[in-house]
Structures are given as C-alpha cells and as structure tokens.
Image: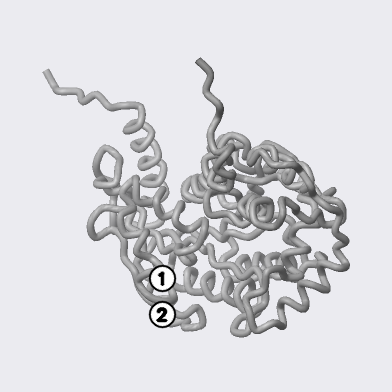
C-alpha cells in the first residue's frame, strides 16, 4: 500500500500558501517550478526582488516569502547591519543581498532580471537634505516599474498609502498618488496596495504615544483635539496581503484594520494600557506646523515634521467597494489584540504585571 504522509495544520497551511505562489510562478516564469511539501526548505517557484526590505514592513514580507521556500533578492543601501536580521528568514542560499542605488537604472534592472515577482516597499515620508518626496515616491517608483517591465517580470506589487490623492494638502499623500500613476504608466498590470497607518512592534504610531506618556510627564499632545479617525492595520496582516497578492488578480487594494478610532481614543487606550492618567492636551495643528518647520531646518534630526502633522490630522477615507484584506485572504487584526505584547515595556515597574490573587 502506498504511504500517505500525515501533515500538521501548520504544514498544510504552508503547503497551501506555497501552492498559491507556485501557481503564480508557473505563468510568470518557467525556469523554477514548485517542489516539496511546503516550508522553507521547499521551492515555492517564486523568485522575488524586494526593494525596501530592510524597513519596518520589509522584514515581515521577507519572512513570509522565506518560510514557504521562495528565493528573495534584497537590494539594500548602507552596510551589512542593514540586512543581517533578514539572513535567517530563508533556507541556505535563498536570501541574496546586493548593494545598490535607486537612481542606478542598470543596477535595478540587474537585480530584477531573474525574478518573476518584484515588490516595491521603498518610501520617503519627509523631505531630507539628500532626497525629496518626489525623488523617491514618484521617480524611484517609476524606475523600479520600468525596469520590471523591461526585464519581463510577471508580477509587480507596489505599496502606496491610504489617502493617496493628487488633491491632498499633504505632499506625502500627493507624491504617493503620483507614484501610483507613474507605476501604472510603466507597468499597467501592476498591483497597488494602500495600507493605513501600520502598527506593530517597530511602529512609530502607538510606540510614539507610549514614549510621550512615559518620558514627558505623562502628557501627549492631541492635534486639533484628536478628532481625526484612523483604521490602524497590523504589520503582519499587511505582509501576508503582499505575499498573497502574488497569486491574486491585479488591481488596487486598500488595507485597513477592523477598528476605527479617533486619535484621542488611541491616546486614551495607550494610557489605560500603561496604567497612567490620560492627561492629553489640545494642541492646535497650526502651532504644530510651525514647530515642524523649525525642526526641519534644525541641524539635528527633527522630532516632528509638517508631513507627520498632516498624517495625524487627515482622517482615513476608504473607497466604497474597494477590495482589501479579505479579498487577499487575510483576516484583519485589531490593535487591542496585540498592542500589549510590545507596549508593556513602557509601563512603570510598579504596574508592570497584573496583580495575582490566590
């Protein structure tokens, strides 16, 4: 009688994921076919170049690709400290790292040449002395899309931002919208993903609120009273959506969490989590813009920028009927389910743990 192996629920899930990726790989490349039962030592059939892999979301995307046996090419800037945490995320020889510059078109072409999937996570949140928002969010996105098209890449996934609009008062959201147009001009069948503010262990949203609560006399400023609404989305959900998009139809997906909260509600939640009084104060955005401008021209790293102010005071707007996490096979995670796991460290020692009763 033939032997039928028994797989655990975890391995079945990995096999299903590898099968989806493999199905996509078959039409985008005939060079590598899926092999194995699923898992990091199998071959998913996907060879993915991930630009921006050393950032917040990038580590989660690389991990999800590596765990199902994909080969991942990581162009990076800087030195080995930028990417060394990514090395264990794939099997031996499956994680490849190359130094590059985004303006070097020939280098970009070289690192997508043998890939059947290209993922662009590169983003600029503020103007700096070396790069403007337009340089990275528009011109950089165009360079990657053009190179992917010229090299015959089967799938391009471009990560933009919710609220991206050419009419936005925020230069960040405006350049994100122009970047989407640039990508679609060069690669019309690209997939666009628009996540809301992303939360997770390395985020600069909930962590920033907790930092203010702990270090600045328990006070957090509420821009314009904290009335703007946000639908924070979990970084692991975004990473899964990006990987699942490899086998999904092209289009524009808006990725938001299941819980809508005002900025004030977020501050109150973090205060309760840290067990400190909620002493938030009203802070006019006009004054915040002035502080942001002064911080930007300072020789030191700015503690606040005008673009950050815009991102906090603009409410999330989801397009009616737009596909999202559910269409990409991801169940959205609300921030109260996971926030304690990484915000606990901000608690004062006297209230660090729950009181245990006999």
Farthest front residue in view: 350
Residue 180: where, in percent of width, then height? Answer: 65, 65
Give the vertical position of 110 relative to 346 (above or below).
Answer: below
Q: As drawn, is 3 to the left or to the right of 207?
A: left
Q: Is residue 75 above or below residue 334?
A: below
Q: Residues within 10 Å of mark 2 (few under 14, many from 20)?
A: some
Q: Disc 1 designates what residue? A: 75
For the residues carrying marks 2 and 1, which lies nearer the camera in this image?
1
336 or 222, nearer to the observer: 222
Q: Look at the numbered discs 2 and 1 and tell me whether their residues touch, using CB distance below 8 Å.
A: yes
Nearer-N-terminus badge (2/1) = 1
**Circle 2 — which element?**
helix
Above or below: residue 312 compared with residue 344: below
Q: Residue at x 49, y 61 (%)?
A: 119
Q: In x, y percent, where is residue 13?
A: 38, 33
Q: Determine whether the residue tagged by mark 1 lies in a helix, strand or loop.
A: strand
Q: Residue at x 54, y 67 (%)?
A: 122
Residue farthest top in this picture: 358
Residue 271: x percent and y percent? Answer: 70, 42
Q: Looking at the rendering, in which quadrant would you find the N terminus?
A: top left
Question: What residue sits right under mark 2 in the picture?
Answer: 107
Q: Please name the residue shown 56% across and 66% down the image.
A: 187
Residue 195 in view here? no
- Residue 83 in view here: yes
């Amino acid at each position: 009688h033939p032997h039928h192996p028994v797989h655990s629920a975890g391995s079945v899930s990995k096999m299903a994921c590898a099968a989806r990726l493999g199905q996509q790989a078959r039409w985008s490349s005939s060079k590598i076919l899926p092999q194995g039962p699923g898992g990091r030592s199998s071959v998913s059939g996907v060879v993915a170049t991930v630009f921006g892999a050393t950032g917040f979301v990038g580590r989660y995307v690389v991990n999800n690709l590596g765990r199902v046996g994909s080969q991942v090419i990581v162009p990076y800037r800087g030195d080995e400290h930028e990417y060394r945490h990514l090395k264990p995320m794939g099997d031996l020889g499956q994680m490849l790292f190359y130094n590059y510059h985004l303006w070097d078109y020939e280098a970009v072409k070289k690192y997508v040449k043998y890939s059947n999937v290209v993922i662009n996570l590169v983003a600029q949140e503020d103007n700096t002395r070396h790069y403007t928002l337009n340089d990275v969010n528009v011109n950089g996105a165009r360079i990657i899309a053009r190179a992917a098209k010229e090299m015959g890449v089967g799938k391009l996934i471009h990560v933009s931002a919710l609220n991206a609009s050419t009419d936005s008062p925020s230069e960040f959201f405006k350049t994100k919208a122009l970047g989407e147009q640039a990508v679609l001009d060069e690669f019309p069948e690209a997939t666009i993903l628009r996540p809301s503010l992303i939360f997770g262990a390395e985020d600069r949203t909930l962590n920033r609120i907790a930092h203010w609560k702990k270090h600045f006399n328990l006070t957090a400023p509420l821009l314009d009273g904290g009335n703007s609404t946000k639908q924070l989305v979990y970084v692991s959900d975004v990473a899964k959506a990006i990987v699942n998009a490899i086998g999904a139809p092209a289009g524009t997906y808006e990725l938001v969490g299941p819980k809508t909260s005002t900025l004030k509600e977020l501050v109150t939640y973090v205060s309760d989590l840290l067990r400190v009084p909620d002493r938030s104060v009203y802070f006019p955005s006009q004054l915040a813009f002035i502080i942001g401008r002064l911080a930007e021209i300072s020789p030191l790293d700015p503690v606040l920028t005008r673009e950050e102010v815009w991102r906090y005071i603009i409410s999330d707007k989801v397009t009616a009927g737009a596909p999202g996490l559910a269409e990409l096979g991801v169940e959205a995670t609300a921030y109260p389910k996971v926030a304690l796991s990484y915000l606990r460290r901000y608690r004062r020692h006297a209230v660090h743990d729950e009181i245990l009763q006999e």
